[in-house]
Amino acid sequence: PPTVRLEDYRPSDHLIDRVELDIRLDPHDTRVTATLALRPNPVGRPGAPLVLDGDDLTLLALELDGQALGPDAYRADPSSLTLSTPPQRPFTLRIETRLDPTANTRLMGLYRSNSVYCTQCEADGFRRITYFLDRPDVLSIYTTRIEAEREAAPILLGNGNPSEAGAVPGTGRHYAVWHDPMPKPAYLFALVGGRLDRVAKDFTTMEGRRVEIAVYVEPGKGDRAAYALDAVERSMAWDETAFGRAYDLDVFNVVAVSDFNMGAMENKGLNIFNDKYVLASPETATDADYAAIEAIIAHEYFHNWSGNRVTCRDWFQLCLKEGLTVFRDQEFSSDMRSRAVHRIAEVRNLRARQFPEDAGPLAHPVRPKQYAEINNFYTATVYEKGAEIVRMLRTLIGDAAFRAGMDRYFAENDGKAATVEDFLEAFEAASGRDLSRFAEWYERPGTPRVAASGSYDASAQTYRLAFRQTRPGAGADAPPLVVPIRLGLVGSDGPLDAATSERVEAGVFVLEAAEDAVTFENVAAEPVPSLFRAFSAPVRVASSLDDAARLTLLRHDPDSFNRWEAAQRVALGLMARQVRGESTETADAFVAALGAFLDAEALHDPAFAAQILALPSEGDLADEIGTETDPDAIFSARQTLRRRLGTGLRERLMSLRETLAEPAGTPFSPDAAAAGRRALRNAALDLIAAADAQAGTALAEAQIEAATNMTDRLAGLATLALLPGEAREAALTAFAERYADEPLVLDKWFAIQAMIPEDGTVARIRRLQSHPAFAMTNPNRVRSLIGSFSLANPTQFNRPDGAGYALVAETVLALDGTNPQVAARLMTAFGPWRRLEPGRRAVAEAALRRIVATPGLSRDVSDIATRSVA
Ligand code: HT7
Ligand code: ZN
């Protein structure tokens, strides 16, 4: 496939100022008439041909300035419409196309989800609706008339504000006209038509605009939309206070659909969501679901400024909207919940998804330099590492300059398509700092490593910390990165606040060279350094701290993140030593330290305690080991440590479960405090069950029986899922019966079974693929059953006999013809294959090469597959 390169960017030769769309919805024969007000771009090439993008389009008619064009005046095929000598002045094109939304299984462009008409245009889906300059730097004002059968689609929604509606006399059809006053790129276009329930509330912005916020869901599910509706309101209020950004239309609509390739989409004034990230009730949604709904509602809403008002010049700048908007939604969630606990969750996620990506064959810079298929670049690197770069920028220049820089970025680029350079320029102006070296973070893949070593001079009472940064795969000429290191010193009784250093400003030392050192004065006793507090840079830290020093941090570090990090590092070290067959004698000290921690603090901050108890994942351990990994050895080391904790802490865990149990009749609250108590009870259950299967079974069964919410019911089921036997199968059957009509809940049931780390799982999944609730056409079902297996069941996915790889490869190929985007995403699970031990590595490579050799692959799958083996 042709490669698109950043260095080849040039402005469009033509612009489209206004777009009038007339869309007559029909299940198989939808007619789209687009009237485009075009003109040559003053900075484009004079006299250049006009080449409009298309994808799978059928052209019915074409007029230029009201005159039908003869066959010699243009060339059209399903993927382009070309006028080789377009007028050198403003002109109008009227294009009529025909679509079959029911046959659209790719879920890009206009499609039907459970009979609801909806669209997904990012990144390049608008060209599946009409021929267009489908690129983000062509911004237009849209007016959209949507027409449909009133019975089938009583609700008709578009971008912007509603301007007119009515009946089409004598037809049973009706229409609605929507006008969006803000210029936008085509990828932000959307429409919805269908039978939907609506919940709504008013919000008055700080500018005095009355906005009607509405959430639309499948009929009968309105009561599950209240949480999402409130989350929109909280997001609007927060963006005003935190960033001074007000909403700019009279309506803000959110629509939930069942078939959606990703989480949600920020179309202007009409966000379309995967219903998984809207629908919530205590009976059907876990605390994690509530938190994800709040975060994603916020994320899409925040795009209204970071993405929509200021958009991207080209897709290489994707991090400009995605990294920034992730940063904004993280800050929102931190303010709504516990900042420390949220930071831990962010870093867990970064390490689970981005670090392996950055260490594998699909690694790419936060701003990629080239792509074959843009839809494969909606990655953890662009999103999550992109957010970390914004966070580092704030750490470097400080809160006030950061906020001033954001204001400036929005003011200077409003209504425009911007670049990473425009973004950094705003912060340079606001802070007076040169950020040219900082910009390097956008340019190169790979997770940097920072080695730290300390030396204490007792007589001078000084402590010298030396740092050395390296980057995997970077040549000797690669410039060092600018790395903000938030740090402090901790003694055996608490933080050493008297210790200071000239080079540490507001708790931050900026490492700019390949090697540098910082010296602290007034250090009364040999300290333990607390480095990269709050995870101040997305790096791997190599330090020679022993377990005792780390346990000092767990006890005394004022930085909660680093307390958690200390416990994780000790656990990782213990498990890694077990994998290597080395001594794990310090495990008892770890258990004792966790016991003391629980006694002192568990009840004060249960959510934090739950994080402390949750061991690093198998993936974290594989990442720590790095090469020649054996998933079975990793699994067994983790089991051993879980068992040790479960045994050593049993009394405390049992008593915490009692103390934290909610009194009967307590109304459900999804708030962070209540969720934190449930999280700790369930973390305790997990460890108790790891050590004592019988007790674990009894507790889990009782918890399922008594559960008044999905968090507790599912946690009980997840515990049982790890304990083979009749109790597990009975609980799974009962769960499936209870939720037979709840596809989103059955997704949890599919996922739990897909993650069972046992020999029978591949066969179980094959049976589940024939379950009446499973459908290859629905991305949520596929991700629940096959995605959970490939990403969260390392021993079975990486089976030495290759049965796990075969299952995923078959699914990828089966899906490729209908939904290549989701198929390609499934393939990314093969990413870490080169880090496996030789036996599995060979089997994984063979599976990958079979995919590469399959004729007729989509560009999406072929791009991932070929990069994976390159
Ligand atoms: N900006 C949105 C990305 C997205 C998307 C991309 C490709 C294909 C389908 C898609 N659905 C949504 C979502 C976001 O990050 O906010
Ligand atoms: Zn986004």
Image (cartoon, grey):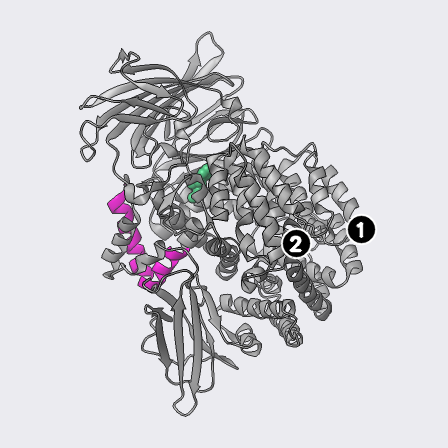
Of 428 and 164, the residue lying toward us: 428
Which mark is on residue 725?
1
- Vertical side of 409 occupied by 3: above or below: above
Pointer 2 or 1: first along the chain: 1
Q: Residue at x 42, y 54 (%)?
A: 385
Q: Say left or right for 794 vs 269.
A: right
Residue at the bottom extreme, as displayed: 459
- Vertical side of 98 occupied by 786: above or below: below
Q: Say left or right for 627 vs 499.
A: right
Q: Quadrant of ligand 1?
A: top left
Q: Give the residue type that dot 1 points to.
A: Gly
Queried on whether the Cβ of the residue with tag 1 lies below 8 angstroms from ligand 1, the answer reads: no
Q: Residue at x 76, y 58 (%)?
A: 696
Q: Say left or right for 99 vs 769.
A: left
Q: Is residue 329 visible?
A: no
- Vertical side of 314 occupied by 341: above or below: below
Task: Determine the image quadrant of residue 269.
Answer: top left
* Image coordinates for residue 96, horizontal then vertical, percent: 37, 17
- Vertical side of 148 occupied by 840: above or below: below
Q: Give the residue type that dot 2 points to.
A: Thr
What residue sits right under mark 2 in the picture? 795
- The dominant secondary structure in magenta is helix
Q: Say left or right for 246 vs 718.
A: left
**Where are the magenta residues, as a range?**
388-414
* Image coordinates for residue 364, horizontal then vertical, percent: 41, 51
Residue at the top extreme, as displayed: 170
Badge nearest the viewer, 2 or 1: 2
